[in-house]
Image: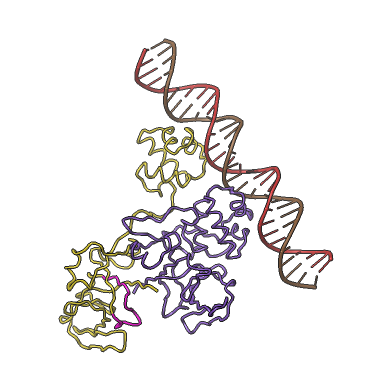
Chain colours: A yellow, B purple, C brown, D red
Amino acid sequence: MEHVREELDRLILKGGYGYASISRLLGRNPAYVQQFIKRGSPRKLDDEDRKTLACFFGVDEQVLGGPANPVTDGMIEIPVLDVEASAGFGAVAASETAHTRFGFDERWLRHLTSAKSASLSIVGVKGDSMEPTLSDGDEVLVDSSDHGSRLRDGIYVLRSDDTLVVKRIAIKPGGRQITIASDNPAYPTWHDMDRAEVHVVGRVIWFGRTL
Amino acid sequence: MEHVREELDRLILKGGYGYASISRLLGRNPAYVQQFIKRGSPRKLDDEDRKTLACFFGVDEQVLGGPANPVTDGMIEIPVLDVEASAGFGAVAASETAHTRFGFDERWLRHLTSAKSASLSIVGVKGDSMEPTLSDGDEVLVDSSDHGSRLRDGIYVLRSDDTLVVKRIAIKPGGRQITIASDNPAYPTWHDMDRAEVHVVGRVIWFGRTL
DNA sequence: CTTGAACGTAGGAATTTTCCTAGACTCGCG
DNA sequence: CGCGAGTCTAGGAAAATTCCTACGTTCAAG
């Protein structure tokens, strides 16, 4: 806790501002900051003051005794691709800008995947072929860097002709062959497909659903 | 600013907790909360206290006078409440850990609910009582403005003693009585509960799941 | 050198926060 | 009914905060 006072002292000294002017910055009496540093009078800085100072000095609030986490911007926005409107994948990205999007906490996302945000995208699920796991209208987060040799059991977005479909893929042990299934038993399952035949867009790592 | 006191008063009254126990939750003297509400003694709640309360009641900090959820470029950020931390009365355990958050497109959200962002919050689902609809680890978006007389069939977050639980609620036609069920048939269903007995935190309007 | 305006310092006053406590009240129990 | 344990309330004490002020210092202008 003493550390905060020293840090603030250093910052003020380095900038050559003087205690009085900083006090005024906070809208307090001129002795306020001096008291805080030398006398330890307010045990902790008020929330507002801390914010003001952090902003002024351009340092993280944490340095001045703020919440123990770096709350600052670690938000990654992933756009929802309008699959209906386009045939292909790449063509979409550049198209209309009015797409809705979701924001994910950076750390949360990093915990989920090591993929760059550029290789992540969100597409809407159409149809009931993946019930009960995925329903019509769900939005799935797709990691397009997770394919090829890294293919493993799980749910993937595939390209079939000019539309995207979501299927469950199972790897046949040791082989080049895979099984493509729909969770909904009313739909067929294809066994022993060759990997090369299947156009994998990416792995589904998360989804959201409106209730 | 008075609004905050009224809001807190309402929350405490609705839950039937009493001022004293909430004061203890904050690790303060028993008269503390009463003083805040009736006498307006601490002009504003301490940052830590606000966080603890917001977490306990499952509402956004904004409701209790906290900073507004950042809205950048049509994107509304909603923090995930650390429900684990509010382990109950007496045990404060104000968590230091980082709160992750999700960002939602403003239009998308507006389409989903008319609720203000202040009345939205996200909590993690614990346990398997709502399988297969909700699984352990899912994150649910809760609209805390959707309760009281507007209660209707659906999935809700309820407070049971000192923890938050997610259950399915069905309204008995025309009556004041409701049914509380878990989707997992291994768990019991309670019929003909009186509405007043149940502490509704809010309605679950969306959820996300990691695959 | 003198002056004045700024500052930092520290004592202590004014104010606010926080706590303690006693009184009135409710509720369940015998 | 009386009792005990809990509450809410309000008065005021204790502690912390915020502010005010006087004093010493520096420094540049006169």
- The number of numbered discs placed on residues in the rendered structure image is 0
- Residue ID at (51%, 58%): B52
Is residue A69 placed above or below B136 in the rendered structure? above
**Magenta stretch secondary structure, dominant:** loop
The spot of residue A128 in percent (x, y) is 31, 82
Q: x%, y% of residue B205?
A: 42, 70
Judging depth in this view, the residue of B147 and A144 nearest the camera is B147
**Which stretch appears magenta?**
A127-142
Quarter occupied by residue A21: top left
Outermost residue, front direction? B174
Look at the picture and state if B15 lies above or below B133: above
Which of B79/A17 is in front?
Answer: B79
* Residue for point 34% across, 80% down: A133
Give the answer, above or below, for where A35 lies relative to A90.
above
User: Quick check: A182 left or right of B85?
Assistant: left
Q: Position of residue B132 (x, y in %)?
A: 41, 80
**Where's the C terminus of chain B, which quadrant?**
bottom left
Q: Position of residue B112 (x, y in %)?
A: 38, 68
> With A58 as the anchor, is B3 left or right in this view?
right
Residue sitting at x 47%, y 35%: A34
Residue B109, image quadrant: bottom left
Whether A147 is among the magenta residues is no
Q: Is residue A140 magenta?
A: yes
